[in-house]
Image: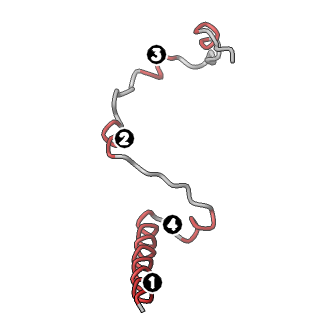
Amino acid sequence: MKTKSIDEMADELRPEYDLGQLLKDGVRGKYADRYREGTNLVLLEPDVADVFTTGEAVNEALRLVIQLTKIQGKRKKISARR
């Protein structure tokens, strides 16, 4: 694979973009703390997003699923003992 030189990449910037203007308000490390926390993002399918419209709703539903799987796990252990 052929890599582009710096001159070739510089030519891809549209003339109407002023790089100095674009970078003047940039803040170094603005999202570094969030990154260190470890954020997990999940893309919901449209039909699921229609039902669960907030992050809280998704979390509540997932917590219920976790509780149900724990109950199912206990039932399997009890029936295996018999």
Q: Which mark is residue 35?
A: 2
Instruction: Residue 42: give x, y in percent of width and height.
Output: 51, 55
Label 1, label 2: how far apart the Cα atoms are: 39 Å
- Label 4 Cα neighbours within 10 Å, binned few <14 / some 14-19 / many ≥20: few
Report which quarter residue 5 is drawn in: top right
Q: CA distance from mark 1 to mark 4?
A: 34 Å
Between discs 3 and 1, the one toward the N terminus: 3
Which residue in the protein does label 1 denote? 76
When the figure is inspected, residue 11 is found, relative to residue 77, above or below; the finding is above
Measured along the vertical axis of the image, is residue 26 above or below residue 49?
A: above
The answer to whether marks 1 and 4 mark residues whose Cβ atoms lie closer than 8 Å is no
Label 3, label 2: how far apart the Cα atoms are: 26 Å
Q: Earlier in the sequence, mark 3 or mark 4?
A: 3
Label 1: element kind: helix
Badge 1 amino acid: Lys
Tag 4 residue: 53
Mark earlier in primary sequence (1, 2): 2
| Between marks 3 and 2 in the image, the one whose residue lies nearer the viewer | 2
Q: Position of residue 12 (x, y in %)?
A: 64, 16
Residue at image location 58% in from the left, 9% down from the top: 6
Badge 3 marks a residue whose secondary structure is: helix
Give the left or right position of residue 41, taking residue 27 as reference. Answer: right
Tell me if mark 1 has few (under 14), some (14-19) or many (20+) residues whose alpha carbon lies within 10 angstroms of its own: few
Q: At 55% from the left edge and 55% from the top edge, which residue is drawn? A: 43
Question: Which amino acid does the dot numbered 4 rest on?
Answer: Thr
- Using the rendered view, name the quadrant where residue 29 is placed: top left
User: Residue at horizontal 45%, vertical 75%?
Assistant: 65
Marks 1 and 2: which is nearer the front? 1
- Distance, label 3 to label 1, CA atoms, is 64 Å
